[in-house]
Amino acid sequence: STKPRIVVLGAGYAGMMTTKKLMKNLSPEEAEIILVNKHNYHYQTTWLHEVAAGTINQNQARIMISDIISPNRVRLIYDTVVEIVKDENRIVLENSELTYDYLVISLGYETNTFGIEGMQEHAFFIENFESCQLIREHMEYQFAKYKNDPDADESSLTILVGGGGFTGIEFVGELVEKVPKLCRKYDIDRGKAKIINVEASPTILPGFDKNLVAYARKSLQERGAEIREGARIKKCTEEGFFVGDDNELIKAGTIVWTGGVTGNSILGKSGFELTKGKVTVNSDLRAPGYENIFILGDCAWVMNKVENRPYPPTAQAAMQHASTCGNNIKALLNQEPLEDFVFSDKGTVASLGVTDGMGTIFSGTKLFGKTAAAMKKVVDDRYLFLLGGPKLFLKKGKVRPF
Ligand code: FAD
Ligand code: NAD
């Protein structure tokens, strides 16, 4: 056909919302839209700590893409992107190839090990839906195995979480609820199963509000988690982490690394110029030097010009990128001027299990405890509503209206 073809890579927050925005902004006659994703489902990356801990029914955290985006309107291709040949406007997928006129790269993050020895080989990552299913199954297996092995070492019950950023802390928040249940299920003394978080900085959640950090630390400690701050992980082996200047070995049966993220490695493979694994995009969200390529979400650094540093990678930002990108593709098609991305910060709320949490909303209002936990669920459900309207919210939402 002679219609311009828009290809969106990755059906995460940025990819799904961009596709929806394009469907709204453009008539079927104006452009062909193609969405490429590894799986036929979209998953809630922001719920992955719950999938990993096994505190949520994992199917609640994923949605069939075709339930949200009509295959009659958007061509859905379930395949893995291997490379973007950007100077030929061509994409190589595992099973086919594709050309584009306009491209949106929204392939999300990958876990960053910073080259720490043994981390890639011996630690689990909260990286995608499948890697989290593996964590959940592995923990359960460790508990079952302990009961069936007379020589078992108690440390096989320990769950070690490396990195006390939001992902690590939210995961520990789930573990303090899950581990007592696993202990009951396998008839194991709760005192034997340790949960240990190791953070290199002097404090967990470095840079976040001090009172909220203190609240989170106390809440997790009171429910049985050990928080080791100022403890840098130097090496990982199948036994555990080696930590600090004296190389203390902390042994565990389940080792999870939540020490950092970087952009999808497809960016590097495709020859984009990278800054710490991501592309620093122009203020209209296009890749420097490419008038027809947008890079969104966790693949992009978007500069906060006021503070002269990039915004942190969040779902909140990814969804806002999608809106600007949808408008800018329409502007390009109509030969109109493009808009600059402007971030609207709605705050940061973290869960500490099902009924506890903490965070800030709007311009700094602090929330603790049940109120924060409820707010987190509202934030999660708001997204479902934006994505799939009341039907999706009723099907997969966390706040039960009835
Ligand atoms: P993603 O949502 O990760 O989507 C990427 C998509 O690309 C996936 O569907 C994936 O399957 C697909 N994909 C990847 N590689 C390929 C390939 N080669 N070929 C085809 N498809 C591919 N942010 C917040 O704002 N609030 C929160 O409360 C929050 N909580 C979080 C909790 C956890 C546990 C984690 C890990 C992150 C959290 N974040 C939160 C951060 C947020 O999840 C990310 O910033 C957000 O997911 C980025 O969106 P994205 O669209 O760039 O990527
Ligand atoms: P992060 O980079 O924010 O945190 C990683 C943590 O690991 C840091 O505290 C760092 O000091 C620590 N670390 C790094 N190397 C270490 C080492 N060798 N030894 C010990 N500790 C080490 O990564 P993240 O927590 O995965 O978060 C990624 C992004 O997702 C962030 O932008 C975050 O804001 C966002 N996120 C948001 C929420 C929320 O809003 N509720 C939840 C999860 C993630």
Image (spheres, rainbow, N blue to C red):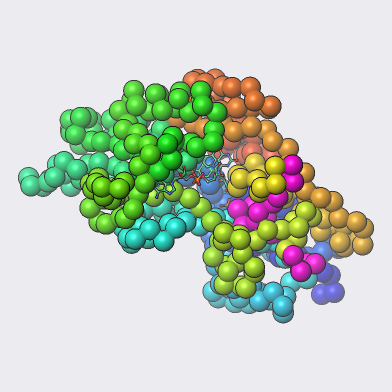
The residue lying toward the viewer, choosing from 369 and 240, is 240
Q: Is residue 143 above or below residue 327?
A: above
| Residue at x 74% of width, y 65% of height | 288
Residue segment shown in magenta: 288-306
| Residue at x 74% of width, y 42% of height | 306
The residue lying toward the viewer, choosing from 109 and 178, is 109
| 305 within the magenta span | yes
Q: Is residue 17 visible from the viewing direction of this image?
A: no
| 29 within the magenta span | no
Please provide percent x and percent y for residue 48. 47, 44
Q: Quadrant of the N terminus?
A: bottom right
Residue farthest to the front, as pictured: 245
Please provide percent x and percent y for residue 104. 70, 61
Please provide percent x and percent y for residue 184. 23, 30
Residue farthest to the bottom, as pictured: 88
Q: In terms of image quadrants, where is residue 286?
A: bottom right
Please provide percent x and percent y for residue 332. 86, 61
Tell me if 283 is positioned left or right of 356 in this view.
right
Query: Number of labelled discs?
Result: 0
Tell me if 65 is positioned left or right of 344 in this view.
left
Q: Is residue 12 visible from the viewing direction of this image?
A: yes
Residue farthest to the left, as pictured: 150
The residue lying toward the viewer, choosing from 161 and 398, is 161
Q: Quadrant of the C terminus?
A: top right
